[in-house]
Amino acid sequence: MLPESPHVPSAFTGATPAFRRVGVTGGLGFVGRNLVRALHRQGASVTVFDLAAPGGANLPEGVRHVPLDLRDPATVTSALGDLDLLFHLGGNSSGTVAVTDPRLDFETNALGTFNVCEAARLTSLPRLVYLSSAMVYGTPQAVPQHEDHPTLPYYPYGASKLSGEHVVRAYARTYGLSAVMGRAFVIYGPGEDPRRAGAEVGQYLRWHLNDRPIHVTGDPDRKTRDFVHVHDIVTALLLLAARGDDGEVYNLGSGREVSLRQLVEHIGDVTGHRPRMLTDDTVTDDTYRLVADVSRLRGLGYRPAVDLAAGLAGLVDALGPTPELPQLDTIFHPTSGAPA
């Protein structure tokens, strides 16, 4: 069973919380929507900054939406004033887009993060949380990956996210910006776009629930991942805001290593019928073991609350019996400024 709500540090609660006025770039995306709901439940005054229109996002009552292109420095600066805290989740999150349009990827992720940091400096933003990615590590040289693991991104997406980290860290050291960073591993849960590369959990479930074979790219035994539920990611982000050290980076994961074959087996256990699996082990670019060392995050009080079985069961309920099938042959081009 999933917890009703993420653990919320005291900085967000009480009569005089430290963070009352909170902004979220990319607040209409997968992680952003979940974070916005958690903040709203605590009574924060939340503003979503996202170039996309709210559409069917169903923002909670009272949450403001401000259209924002991260590539426009003047607009970013004018939009981000009068906040106690900003979660910077915005940018391109599609590895496919990063490969097919690396300029867009770099401008939204790296330059966009620079614009956010410069706006934070000019407006004296009290606190910034930047969501980066485990893709900054590239091909792992050690398992599990600690934050001190070498950062040698394999794809443009990892390079653009790492560039954003360097900017945040430089602003923290040079200008005293109170900022902290989190490297997300493989996030899953209700609301995830199944077209996104790395969305194996949602993709596999959609195929299986439609009685289709599950397509596994890479060696299903040697390719392992750290699957972390979006509920736990929201908890981690709130902890970073309240307790993270300035200029520091934290792995955001479950700390549990799961092979793709084990993921398929878990899906069979949860649904009660055995999946069919089609494998293509000729693709070896990302056949490696990716798992977070979360000891640094645990030092802030983090304890993942959703194990894979419970997370899968909740996602089965959310998807329903015959969910839309993932169209992996269609390249997903998110709107500039779309959320992580």
Image (cartoon, rainbow, N blue to C red):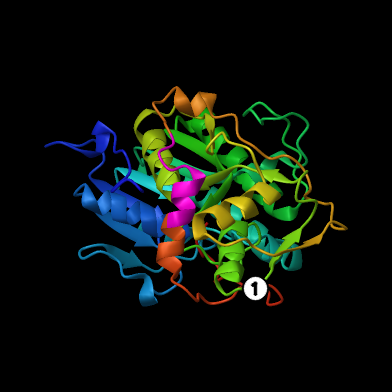
Q: Which residue is mark 1?
A: 212
Residue at 88 percent of width and 58 percent of height: 282
Q: Position of residue 71 (x, y in %)?
A: 55, 62
Determine if the magenta segment contains residue 103: no
Residue 129, by quadrant, is top left
> What secondary structure prevails in the magenta region?
helix
Q: Residues within 10 Å of mark 1 (few under 14, many from 20)?
A: some
- Depth check: give the residue in front, 331 or 262: 262
Residue at 63 percent of width and 72 percent of height: 332
Is 244 left, or right, of 215 in this rendering? left
- Depth check: give the residue in front, 245 or 290: 290
Q: Type of residue at label 1?
A: Arg
Asked whether residue 33 is in view, the answer is yes
Q: Position of residue 151 (x, y in %)?
A: 72, 36
Q: Magenta residues, as a range?
A: 304-313
- Most extreme residue toward the left is 15
Q: Position of residue 295 (x, y in %)?
A: 53, 24
Residue at 68 percent of width and 60 percent of height: 95
Secondary structure of the residue carrying numbered label 1:
loop
Q: Position of residue 64 (x, y in %)?
A: 27, 64
Residue 136, by quadrant, is top right
- Depth check: give the residue in front, 261 or 165: 261
Residue 8, by quadrant, is top left
Residue 77 position (above or below residue 180): below
